[in-house]
Amino acid sequence: MRKETTIPISRRRKRRTPDSCLPYLALAVLLICGAFIAWGRLAVLLSGVQFLTQQEICQTVLLEGILVKEEIVIRSPVTGKVHFKATDGNRLEMGAPAAEVVAVEGGGASYRLITPSAGMFCTHLDGLENVLSPANLDVLDFSSLERISRKQVLEGERVEKGQPVFKLIDNLSATYLYTETSKTDFPVQLKEGSNWFKATWNDLPLMVKTYSIVEKGDRWEGLFQLSGFPDELVHNRQVSLKIISVRLAGFLVPQYAVVYRDETPGIYLAVKKRAQWVPVKVEGELQGKVAISGRGLGEDTRYVSNPLLVRDGSLVE
């Protein structure tokens, strides 16, 4: 006699019909479409479409040092009290009355101090006027110079015979800056003595050119010739100059905006809200920026600054 067995309903295999899979297929299609739409919108949001603009960026180096300039020291002819006829920092003509010394002996006779040449009137003396002269550049030993001690003769002060009272600075003659700096902080471009570089002192413009550079261990010791400097500069002995060692100007874009095809650089332009790759020429790179040029590029040109998710024909705004 055959024994019948009954399989529990929970263990019976359910057979899916084609109609039962349709909801899953529709959901998968919706998810895929949604992913493509989200990817496209993400690409649009991250593309960073901008207008090309003319820009300029610079790499600067700060050089601190002492000025070597043409100076004439005027001394008192007698012992007495000094009275100035000129204002410190003003430029005087040759033969101008600069000061007067009233002698303490001999009935209080006064002696006028006349400028022997044109120059900037300065009462700040440091004792290095006859040492730090352009005429002595070839024999100057800057390492042997003692610490600069700045002194100033004040109005009404007693001065001794032969004592320096003031000086005239020739701001029209050659002026130099002596400086020492580490090799790591010194741009190699400044070692070229034939080029003039833009610089600033207290935000005032001037030009700088290398006169001589000497290697001293891990440092450079050098002289720089100055040109086109403001008159106020030579009224100082110790100054700090900010020199523009590298300059990049033109249509600047982020370095990652340049996309290479077969070793040819190019950028994506936004043309009718669609990305279009065009070749460009890279003129230079500095601080993460690239200067580019190319046919049809102008300040009305819109480009993709972040082409990470962009391809030809991609929607961009």
Image (cartoon, rainbow, N blue to C red):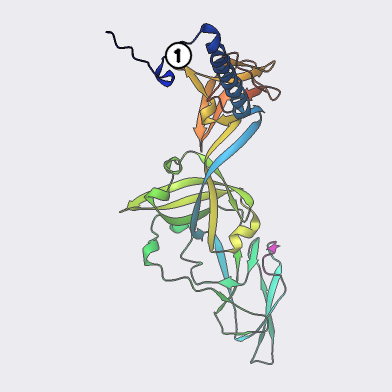
In this view of the protein, which residue sits in the foreground, 31 or 93?
31
Q: Furthest residue to the left?
A: 1
Total residue callouts: 1
Q: Is residue 63 above or below residue 49?
A: below
Is 315 situated left or right of 307 in this image? right
Q: Amino acid at mark 1?
A: Lys
Q: Which residue is drawn at the image coordinates 41% and 42% (left, top)? A: 188
- Residue 171 to residue 306: above or below: below
User: Whole-percent x and y of residue 317?
Assistant: 68, 23
Q: Nearer the viewer, residue 310 or 34?
A: 34
Can residue 279 be seen from the camera position used here? no
| Quadrant containing the N terminus in the rendered view | top left
Residue 231: tell me if it is visible.
yes
User: Is residue 8 shown left or right of residue 26?
Assistant: left
Above or below — where is 239 with respect to 156? above
Query: Looking at the image, is 265 positioned above or below residue 182?
Result: above
Q: Secondary structure at mark 1?
A: loop
Residue 103's spot in the image, x, y percent? 65, 87
Magenta stretch: give its range.
88-93
- Comparing 14 with 163, the one in front is 14
Secondary structure mostly seen in the magenta stretch: loop
Q: Dot 1, crowdedness within 10 Å: few (<14), some or many (≥20)? A: few
279 or 107, which is in the foreground? 279
Instruction: Find residue 88 and report its image quarter.
Output: bottom right
Q: Which residue is mark 1?
A: 14
Residue at 40 percent of width and 67 percent of height: 145
> Horizontal and vertical percent for residue 229?
61, 51
Left or right of 62 in this view: 219: left
At a point 56% along the width and 66% down the height, the residue shown is 72
Q: Position of residue 127 (x, y in %)?
A: 49, 72
Q: Is residue 131 magenta?
A: no
